[in-house]
Image (cartoon, grey):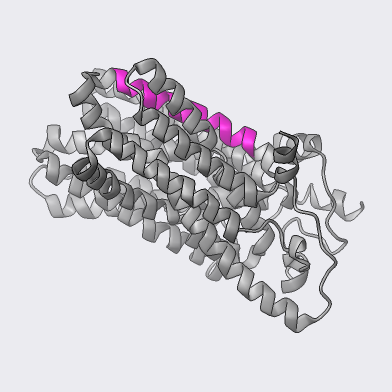
Amino acid sequence: MNWLLKLLEPAPYLPEIEDPAEVKKLYHYWRIRILYSMFVGYAFYYFTRKSFTFAMPGIISELGFDKSQLGILASVFSITYGISKFASGIISDRSNARYFMALGLIVTGIFNILFGLSSSLVLFCLFWGLNSWFQGFGWPHCARVLTHWYSQSERGSWWSTWNVSHNVGAFLIPWIVGFSAYYFGGWRAAMYIPGIICIMGGFYLINRLRDTPQSLGLPPIEKFRNDYAGTSTKSGEQELTAREILIEYVLKNKYIWMLAIAYFFVYFVRTGINDWTALYLIENKGYSQLSANGCVSLFEVGGFFGSLAAGWASDYFFSAKRGPVNVLFAILMFTAIALFWFVPAGYPLIDSVALFVIGFAIFGPQMLIGVACAELSHKKAAATSTGFAGTFAYMGAAVAGYPLGKITQEMGWDGFFWALGISCTLSIVFLLPLWAVTENRKLVPAKNNA
């Protein structure tokens, strides 16, 4: 066990390379390699996160579970994953992203395989809960790496390029599950094969990923790009204790709280649209199962383009300000949902466009709130701050399960859309005060004087 703990410690810094040409060459190489490694790795995380969703019909058919029983697994996943993002975020800021992210991916693969070997609801809950816990090892380490390898003035575009990896993973996994179930023996194979892919993906990350620039003998990214925006300082990097990271830079940080609460409402809307829209189209607008699923798939397509647009726009049109883009996208989210609600049955093209725009709008703040959390905290607290906000996000996702279903059951689909509309409005309320904020000025002087 000691060897594992030693492996997970932050990579030690090497003596800094003095040759500017060599530094430039290495930075160019490693920034590209780090990005595509994280992209592939996080897309793989979605293979073991979404495998159960698409294996569910086979589980119901073979084992006779009903929707409410399997719905328990969705709640277990959201709650456990949300808590794990915060806990692993605290650990991530003081660990080696290369090995920690890989470990999480390997273990999620193992638990997918164990899930496929099981048949009881108790074991399903156990293995899916453990899977969701290790799923939390993915996002915070990516936040840490993105903060250390890309400076603030460019971070939105790099972060958004990485962020669409989960759209790619979510797009690919139903095809992988369907192929596995059809050719290799049903829903169990649909759990085994994504699990095996992710175990191999973990070893891929160990081979390709690295921790910080300094662990390769490179200067900090701020020094390399002469970009000391936000909470970065020219006086050098100072290691922080876990207590300093959690208390001073997260729990006492009003900006992180505002972003976290906004995240709750954004994820409530995201999950509500993602999980309930196909049923709404079938019940309220006369869609078939196939046409409803096809229409909802445009939500992820819109999200792909929305993530890219939000990140690049924040860098190149708003000078690395995340606030204006978050607010504008949240307003668009409200508008598109209202359009989708009021369009009568018989206009599938308008429904499709509306769902594309909803996905476009939701995935903007879904991505940029994470960027803002990293930038309005301390560089050494990026994983903790994004993990903390992520916990709020997945509490919102959990509320979009049974509670939103209960609202819909009691108040009909009007109640469903009222709940989404109120959540959109509240997300705007909490994002609006951050319109012009690019740094936490209260925190910068403390480190400048260190």
Residue 174 horizontal side relative to residue 7, left or right: left
Q: Residue 130: x percent and y percent?
A: 50, 28
Residue drawn 49% across the image and 58% down it:
39
Question: In front here: 146 or 397?
Answer: 146
Residue drawn 74% across the image and 84% down it:
21
Q: Residue 432: x percent and y percent?
A: 54, 47
Question: In front here: 296 or 195?
Answer: 195
Q: Please, what is the dominant secondary structure of the magenta stretch? A: helix
* Number of disc labels: 0
The N terminus lies in quadrant: top right
Residue drawn 72% across the image and 63% down it:
213
The stretch drawn in magenta includes residue 71: yes
Q: Is 440 placed above or below 72 here?
A: below
Instruction: Name the quadrant containing residue 389.
Output: top right
The stretch drawn in magenta includes residue 399: no
Magenta stretch bounds: 69-88
Question: In front here: 259 or 34?
Answer: 34
Residue placed farthest to the right in the image? 449
